[in-house]
Amino acid sequence: MLSLAHLDKVYPNGAHALDDVSLDVGAGEIVALVGGSGCGKTTLLRLVSGLEAPTHGEVRVDGEAISAPHPAVGFVFQEPRLLPWLSVAENIGFGLEHLPAGERRDLVEEALLKVGLAGYGSRWPRELSGGQAQRVSIVRALVTRPKVLLMDEPFSALDALTRATLQDHLIALWEASQPTLLLVTHDVEEAAALADRAVVMQPRPGRVFADIPIALPRPRDRLSSGFVEAKRAVLAALDGSLSQPIGGRTSSDSQAPAGWW
Amino acid sequence: MSDMPIARKTTARMPARSVSARLGGGFVYGLLLPLAAAVIYEAAFRAGLVQARLLPPPSRIGETLWKLASSGALTTHVIATLLRVGLGFGLGAIIGVMLGALTGSSTLARRLLDPTLQALRAIPSLAWVPLFILWLGIFEPSKIALIAVGCFFPVYLGVMGAIANVDRKIVEVGRAFRLSRLKLARRVLLPAILPDTVVALRSGLGLGFMFVVAAEIMGASEGLGYLLVDGQQLGKPDQILAAILCFAVLGKAADWLILVATRPLLSWQDSFARSG
């Protein structure tokens, strides 16, 4: 459904962010991209979104090549990035401008209800907490009903408790329309809590290191042995990806292990 | 804008009391200092403590103002001055916003135009006066040109800087939602630069009042600046002070108008000044 074929990305400054990354994601699948900093996971997400173009290779959604932001692909940024001059309701409706006002209002109301922010529609973004703002930003992307939702470490700025709550929220939202979800994270627990598959990436240049299926039923119990086992598997792969001597590269590249935190 | 109905609801939600308190309450506080100074000086004058030949007491300034007002002369002078400021500021601000938007949004335009404009900015605006008089004559056009030049630069700089400072991350949201260039400008860039643009317009207007005085001192038969020169030549300090008072009131009122007119558009701002 979402297919990345031989993606290469070299930035104008010579940084080699991605090297021959291929990945196939099925419809409705949740894939977590896990990796240390500098492994190109954010770059990968931006290529899929069409915000940046790959140097080589291509991204296809249902067979259609992505070369610029596409209506079938939604993006949730690391920060909420709400427009401060629009009310919460207007922010959610930002991508719905083409719809008639009544229909837009209904969709926005429904979205607010779904994320537990009913009655918050007329507030300004500055009046929201970090967790609330990120919830608004998630429904802003979801309300246009994208087939693919991309999320770039959406919960990394939040405290652990809020993060766990929002992860549950996200799964509830996802279940309603079941978009394909590609989620970048550096949090192993987050990958185990959300994903059907964890794709562990290796830095300098970014490549796929391991593809770990997480076949746990939802809702997931974070204390179950299966969950702990999944976390351990992802963590082990992550450790492997960072300590693996990189073939043909100088040893100065292996400063990565300290950096991924 | 099609988002408007929701926006109106949002502003209406603001309690009316706090708005009136911010306008009315602040107004009273602001008057305390000048009124107290006037009362003290008046008292000192009545008690014979000060020599009033060069600094007439408030009562005499008020009397002069009243005479000017009742003869209709004050209205003529005020209208002449406001017309010049209005036309000059309007002209300078419009060109400033347009050129600032151009150089702010296009690197090519900035490289081509900005160095020249910065060099022109380095010329004291009053240096243009002889040239403007030669080109445009001694009457209104040369005065308005001078005011327009004075207003242009702060507006131009402010708008250009505002566009350059728009958060790249917010612009990217617009791109992710596939906004066309025009829609990106209308729905993202325009609201984002509005606060800085208002500040730029206010400083431009302030300079407008500065240059209208310069223009009127150099040669005019009416206007508040003319009242200043006339008062100096005929030794009437009360008339000079009356004109100065008018400038203070008009300048403050014009600035306040910009603030009030743009406040509904800026009520979203999350800044230190709002919380005060």
Image (cartoon, coloured by chain):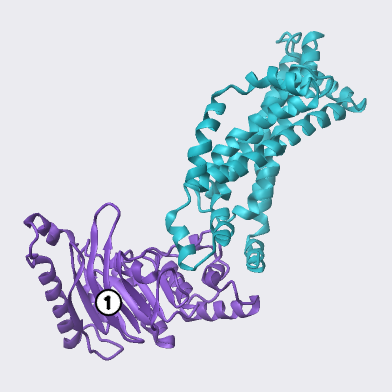
Q: Nearer the viewer, residue A83 or B15?
A: A83
Crowding at mark 1 (Cα within 10 Å: few <14, some 14-19, many 20+): many
Q: Position of residue A14 (x, y in %)?
A: 24, 54
Q: Is residue B36 visible?
A: no
In the image: residue A102, left or right of residue B47: left
Residue identified by numbered label 1: A32
Q: Nearer the viewer, residue A55 or B140?
A: A55
Q: Amino acid at mark 1?
A: Ala
Name the residue rendered at 49%, 75% in the picture.
A117
In the image: residue B168, left or right of residue B101: left
Colour in which chain A is drawn: purple
Name the residue rendered at 81%, 19% in the picture.
B220
Image quadrant where residue A259 sits: bottom left
Q: Is residue A243 visible?
A: yes
Question: In the displayed structure, would residue A171 be above or below residue B3?
Answer: below
Q: Chain of mark 1?
A: A
Pick the quarter of the image with the N terminus of chain A. bottom left
Pick the quarter of the image with the C terminus of chain A. bottom left
In the image: residue B141, left or right of residue B129: right
Q: Position of residue A50 (x, y in %)?
A: 40, 68
Name the residue rendered at 19%, 80% in the picture.
A211
Question: In the displayed structure, would residue B13 be above or below residue B43?
Answer: below
Question: In the displayed structure, would residue A156 be above or below residue A112?
Answer: above
Name the residue rendered at 75%, 36% in the picture.
B86
Of all residues, the one furthest to the right in this rendering is B71
Q: Secondary structure at mark 1?
A: strand
Chain letter, colour cyan in render: B
Q: Position of residue A71 (x, y in %)?
A: 48, 75
